Amino acid sequence: MIERFVARVLLLLLSGQLVLPLRSAESAVRAPDSDVVAAASSDKSTNSFHPVTPGIIDGRIAFLAASMLEHNHYLKLPFDASLSSKFLDLYLETFDPQHRVFTQADIAEFDHYRTNLDHLTITERRVGDTTPACEIFNRYVERLEQRTAYVDQLLKNEKFTFNTDERVTFNRKGLPYPKDIEEAKQLWREQLRFEYLQERLGKLGARKKAATLAAKKKTPTTGTSAPGKTSEFPNEAQTGALDPATYDRLRQALHDKMIESGAGAGAKQNPPRVETAARGSGATNGAALATPKKTEAEEIIETLSHRYHRNLRFFTDWNNEDVLQTYLTALARVYDPHSDYLGRAQLEQFSISMNLSLFGIGAELVSEDGYCRIRRLLPGGPAIKGQKIKENDRIVAVAQSNQPPVDIVEMSLNKAVQLIRGPKGTEVRLTIIPAAADASSRTVVSIIRDEIPLEESAAKAKIIESSDGHGGTLRIGVIDLPSFYATFDTSGSKDKPEPKSTTVDVARLLTKLKQENVAGVILDLRRNGGGSLEEAIKLTGLFIKTGPVVLVKEGDSVQEAKDEDPTVLYDGPLVVLTSRGSASASEIVAGALQDYGRALVVGDISTHGKGTVQSVNQLRPYMNLANKSLTNDPGALKMTIKKFYRPSGASTQLRGVVPDIILPSVANESKDIGERALENPLVWDEIPSAKFDHLNLVEPYLTDLRKHSAERVAADKEFAYVREDMERFKKQQADKTLSLNEKVRLKENQQLDERIKARDKERLARPEPTEKIYELTLKQVDLPGLPPPVAKTNAALANLSIRGATGVSGAGRNSAAVATGNSASEDSIDETDEEKPAAQDAPLTETEHILVDYLSVLRKGSPVTAGH
């Protein structure tokens, strides 16, 4: 669905990555598919908050990080009073970006730090003072405790009616902090009312879906539905504030998903829970009593109460390392948005994301009602191989070999994950509650940790086969490249990850595509947030002979990073597909291939616009700690040290890469996407061009290609939907408030539902596409022949993110075809899937058409020859 695609774009565009080999990296470390997926800590806690105080070496870490930023960052900015003021503001904004938690009195109290954080951090004794970090954090938690208590009071006494003209200001960024606690309470109440209405609307949508399913099955529904998946809206455990602005930007997409999933209402509704009247006492001779069913209001109150208490618990679980992580990252972000301090856990996550592997049991975990639940078992991991644990099992304790178990119920997910992970070949014992068992059941499972390859983030390909219009077939290859990964080891452990190379993997895929006689190739970089600079250079070399790929400037020095290998693996027609999420290393590749005239670039109005290079500098070698007992990993500083430029001399910083053919996209209208939306971005500039071969394989054909594409886009129904969404999005951005009138919101939701249903109906009425799609993973690429074409199921099509495919009839089989493991999760399908249209990917479909046009206009005898 277009709406879901928009949501993914808006949520993921700000995570571009670019790194130098082995010691370099880029922006915020994204959580890979690993032992940890989600987020907030568990539910209510009776423990009182113990204020955080600086750790014994925190000051030295702060001094070292600040000194390195001052002297080694690209800008060479002195850490003075002016920067100190920005530092304070950014640290406060990190916790309270919507100005709903701190009061003006709090800010005034902290204001004495405004001009002396530099002196406190960098001292003559080389021991910084991180007291301000803890003091501000402790006040934040104090305010959260007050807010949670106030919310509990409101949930107990408030009558939640929504029949006035009240509206909520969904984006308070830039507005004044509340004057005092009383004014803050007004904002908290307004926020709670917004959330309550969201829950009510979600439940109504779930009930409507349950009724629809029941009517279609001709079976009655009983009771109220399960809660809708409103937890998918961002909450403060992740963002620092429940942000209606985020909701507004994603309202259509998330509402669409909520209506479709409905939490399994009706047909998938769980039976009433039955418990013994006096568990373990035997007082009732085993008699069972049904748990009283809650009213809708009681369910909403319970959901919201849990949400606020989980959020509070998330922060009360913080220690000095968590505070230092946030504090020094705020300092680094004053210099530019891609510099960070990486604590031990963050550095480990960065290494995982670069290596596409980790050492552990191989499971995705989520925190749910105080339990660590297994959401998914990763292919190739010891957990799935051992078949001793299953999805939805809950882990309640973790024990190392020959050690007693540690209770992890109510423990923060990150800390639980650190206990579960460990060196290859070591034992971990998990005490679990099996998914289908009573909560009192316990089973101990022993697992030997091993390396888990994260294959889902690796390069993959597909072949799209269709009629050539002359009685034959035409094959187009698509390479999906989500990142530029490479071997990156920071652990110092003897367990080294299996070597990874983006270029090696893509070369294997290209070789297979050539063997299967594709006429042209699409390199899809839409999801690619960056990665290894070295891999970006090597990969560009697969398509050109030799020459500069990127110019790197450090101070007054400019160096050319060249492809030195004259071998060209693929010299056929090439299209690069980009989005506003294509960042950093992907912009290097797209910009270089465009400058050379080697590839046609198609996509959003521009790429992300990240034109900087970061280095990761581990701090341990600089600490010189005399007391070896204090040598806990002090982490690393990731800071911007260079800017890069295209071979033409133009920077991609801020402006990104502008495609040769721009396609309509809701992301084109957003002011909150891309480098320009980040704090303190570096400026755009340009330097003299390098010398390189202008192949001129695109420019002669652009006029005709743009004309034909524009005609198709104007007539294409999917792009008509995109244009409609663009207009609505612009109106939503102009309106800074949301209605809290239930009838108004119900009408809006009804209009949205009708619009979605009308689109689904129109899509279902379309003729079935005649093309076949063959998916190729790295496991399959070296096998002879092709696997069967992708089955025409909604789940499979959604995984591919492409338009419909034909069935398997007449397909050739790979001689050793194996299951690819791309089955849909239980969250992605429901009882009405057979009535939903195939997932649509209008940009990819149009890019296919553009490539076919490109093939038809290439002059005979051109240096680019299809199939070579």
Image: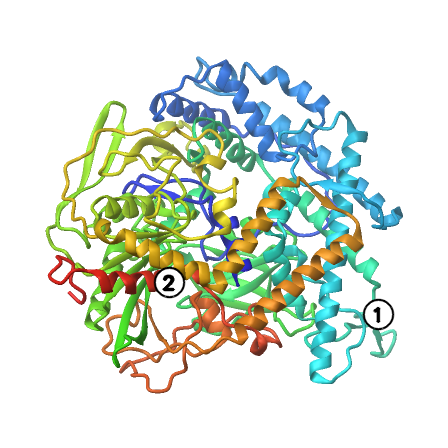
- In the rendered view, tell whether residue 390 sits above or below residue 500: below
Residue at mark 2: 455
Image x and y of residue 502, in percent: 28, 55
Q: Residue at x 85, y 71 (%)?
A: 277
User: Observer-nearest residue: 311 or 248?
Assistant: 248
Name which of mark 1 and mark 2 comes first in the sequence. Answer: 1
Give 70 or 386, whichever is nearer the viewer.
70
Q: 70 or 348: which is nearer to us?
A: 70
Q: Gap in Å between the C-alphas at discs 1 and 2? A: 49 Å
The residue carrying pointer 1 sits among few (fewer than 14), some (14 to 19) or many (20 or more) residues within 10 Å by Cα, namely some
Where in the figure is residue 450, as x and y percent of width and height? Answer: 39, 62
Question: Image point 77% across, 57% down: which residue?
Answer: 200
Is residue 256 left or right of 429 when viewed as pictured? Answer: right
- For the residue marked with disc 1, what is the amino acid? Ala
Amino acid type, callout 2: Glu
Residue 252 in sight in this render? yes
Quadrant placement of the C terminus = bottom left
Residue beneath disc 1: 278
Sort mark 2 into few (<14), some (14-19) or many (20+) by Cα contacts within 10 Å. Answer: some
